[in-house]
Amino acid sequence: MSWNRVAVVGAGLIKFGELFDQSYEQMAAGAFAAAVDSVDHGFEPSQVEAAFVATQRGTLWGQEGIGGNTVPSAIGLAGIPCTRIENACPSGSDAFRVGAMAVASGVHDVVLVIGVEKMRDKSAEEGLLARAAAGHPIFTRGETAPVLFAPFATRHMHEFGTTREMLASVAVKNHYNGARDPYAHFQSEITVEDVLASPSVCSPLHLLDCCPQTDGAAATLLVRADIAERFTDHPVYVAGFGVATDHPYLHEKSSFVGLKATQLAAERAYAMADVSPADIDCAEVHDCFTITEILDIEDLGFVDKGKGGVASLDGETSLTGRIPINTSGGLLAKGHPIGATGVAQLTECWWQLRGEAGDRQVELRHGNALQHNVGGRGSGVSVINILTTNQP
Amino acid sequence: MTPGVQLLAVGAAAPSWRLAATEVGAAWGRPGGRGQAAVCAPDEDTLTLAAEAARRALLASGLQTDIVDGLWWGTSRPPFAEGPSHAVLASAVGLSHRSGGALFAGSSHAGIEALFGAADAVGAGTVRVALVVVSDAIVPGLGTSWEPRAGAGAAALVLVSHGGAASLGARVTRTHPYLDRYRGDDETATRDLYDPRLFREEIFLPAMRELGEQLGTNDIDRWSLPDPDGRLGAALARQLDAGTPASASVYAALGDTGAAAALLGGVCALDAAGTVGIVGWGGGRATGVTITAREPVPGAAAVADVLKGGRPATYAAVLQARRQLVASGETVPMGVPPQSAQFVRGADEMLGLLGARCVDCGTINTPPSIHPHCISCGSAKFVLEPLARHGRVYTFVVNQTMPAPFVAPLPLAVIDLDDGARVMLQVTEHEGTLEIGSEVELVVRRYAHERGAPVYGYKARPYAIREDQ
């Protein structure tokens, strides 16, 4: 495969949380400013040639259709080419991939990838939970977000003996990391007992097995690798990416102990980046629910199928473990503003690879970090990006 | 006499909840109260009961549903005051698009009217196989003396021109323009009797006695008699020297089942040879008919099991299910309005529960309209077929967190049906015992009440509950 190499020279986000005092536009402006400020040698906003915006669900703040024009206006760049990418929970990571392809193709030298999501302008009942009444009037009625993943937990527990304590250990670890991430929605540690004692949301998942509803925005600046030195002495490169789809309804799944979309996307991303799971120093993976992280680390090849629960309980995925997972706090503690999530995960990977993750810094052995999202109806879309400090 | 009208099989259904009279009495500060009534859970109504009774009668008959010529349905309150009540039930029962029949409504006499409508069509030779369904789910006035007895249930009868185990016999009828129990055009609850003494002495007993004595000239072995208040039935039986009517067991288990009452009482008496005298009442009319069984009628013996089921419900839960107690605040509208194109495209596959079997690899794709290509092999060649109605839970969840109008806990299960199809459906009548591998059967239930329209589809029900069936 022949493509122009792409470097990430800037990345940043705003503090995630219930940002009742900020508009969609203000969040976008904040994330863009953070990315611009992060560029070591300085960055002129006017250098942005094109932007790719990830926003998954404008209906959560009363906007039926959001094109690509809202963000350029909000960040003072009205007039630039801008496209909105919507690809379910991986919207942010897919916008990054599309932005990278725009640079890799040679069409653009400098692009902005920005993810913005307003999740809390509506009440929970009229917001995310309203999807219980969306979709097919019979065959998906009652299908809130946890319903997409809880059947996998039921089955994973049945087939592999995974326990609620093992699920809880994922939340405990991610809240621990989130308490060390100033941008995380939640800033405090929790215990296994806290998770077990939290109210049932959708059995077998309890409240602390679930990510919160969070407002947020994040941005990255991508340039052609051969001009990266104008912006920084410590560029991080796009090593590869992978995208895959699966059937969109749960009853069409043949397995409930793994996500085929993730498995296929991983195969493609590892092949493109020419790395294996053992070459990854840390990963930001999609932990919308505790079970999701367990499925992810198996599907991404970090642990054997069926061992995700035990590995989590044993600390293999902690900051100092064999493969640190979700050092930022993940979706569980940092939050899941859908369009912003993937871009924020990539920002964490960028910080880790540049050694800028502070208390959360992991040991760098290979210089590779992996970012992953999975979602959509039936968890049928997965996007994976792999970043590296290794010169292409 | 109705020449040549035979009864091939019968079926019955009762809703899943029972409300004790003491629960109602306690709410209104009244002492005691005896007995119980069958009440619909939030996803049950007169149509779901009708569908279940019809399915059982058709199974007992051994007939394929597509040879049924028509559906004659009697219910005092069809699910649509105006609308496709009859067509939805016909579709849910699996009748052909060419099937006919009629809907009788307006009073608890509607059940008998449906029977006669069907019998006359069979007798006249215009149809060969007629399905009669009588059902009701009464919504009584709050605080009325009738309230603790207002029940729900359904019965179904398959009529043919020859070859049945029983035949319809004599009919007698009386009509008087009196107000007994009624519901005005703009009212949701049925009003109770104005003056119980007036009703007893001047309306009910005189008419019933006259009618019963005339019917009684036919050597009746067992009776199904109306019992509007829990005492009049016994009084009438004494006057007719009828012993304990067969219908007493139905009233004791289910309460007053309205338009279903007369035939429910009748079909449970058809489990042995003999003549049953059936009297229906309501809306100023009273009608009697005899059915003579030469041998036990298929399906009749199972009616007793239907009467045994049900689990206790609180008064508050019952009021909510009847929409007499409604939470304030907004409810989340269904993403797809029930009048819209998706329901037109999906009518057969939703109510008929169809799958598309791939001609090339055999995989069943559900629902067909969203699968132009097979999920297993990509082929575009399919044959449509009804899905199996029985299977096992592969995995499941119990959703506890949903906005109104959803009610938690709501189990959703991925189910492997006996024909190899995999579906995901809501689970109803679960007792918190759902497990991987649990046996379930699929039944018609009301999924929502949207823009005034009931929306029906299949749900999974733990099979063990009705293992007797």
Image (cartoon, coloured by chain):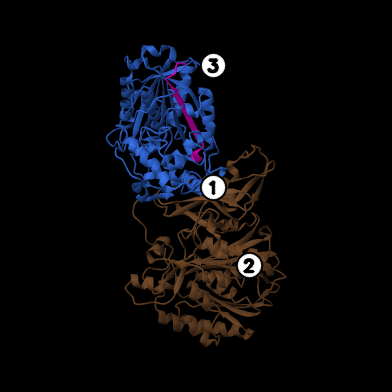
Chain colours: A blue, B brown
Q: Nearer the viewer, residue B82 or A387?
A: A387
The quarter of the picture where residue B29 lies is: bottom left
Chain of the residue on which disc 3 is drawn: A
For the residues carrying marks 3 and 1, which lies nearer the camera in this image?
A: 3
* Cα distance between the residues tagged 3 and 1: 49 Å
Give above or below for A301 relative to A142: above
Chain of the residue on which disc 1 is drawn: B
In this figure, which residue is indicated by the disc labeled 2? B118
Is residue B101 shown left or right of residue B198? right
Examine the rendering and report whether any part of residue A375 can be seen.
Answer: no
In this figure, which residue is indicated by the disc labeled 3? A2
Q: Which residues are magenta?
A: A376-392
The quarter of the picture where residue A363 lies is: top left
Q: Nearer the viewer, residue A329 or A382?
A: A329
For the residues carrying marks 1 and 2, which lies nearer the camera in this image?
A: 1
Outermost residue, left direction? A21
The disc labelled 2 sits on which kind of residue? Answer: Ala
Chain of the residue on which disc 2 is drawn: B
Helix, strand, or loop for circle 2?
helix
Helix, strand, or loop for circle 1?
helix
Q: Is residue A384 magenta?
A: yes
Residue A126 lies, in percent from the top left, at 37, 44
Is residue A241 shown left or right of residue B1? left
The disc labelled 3 sits on which kind of residue? Answer: Ser
For the residues carrying marks 2 and 3, which lies nearer the camera in this image?
A: 3
Helix, strand, or loop for circle 3?
loop
Count the labels in the image: 3
In this figure, which residue is indicated by the disc labeled 1? B343
* Cα distance between the residues tagged 1 and 2: 30 Å
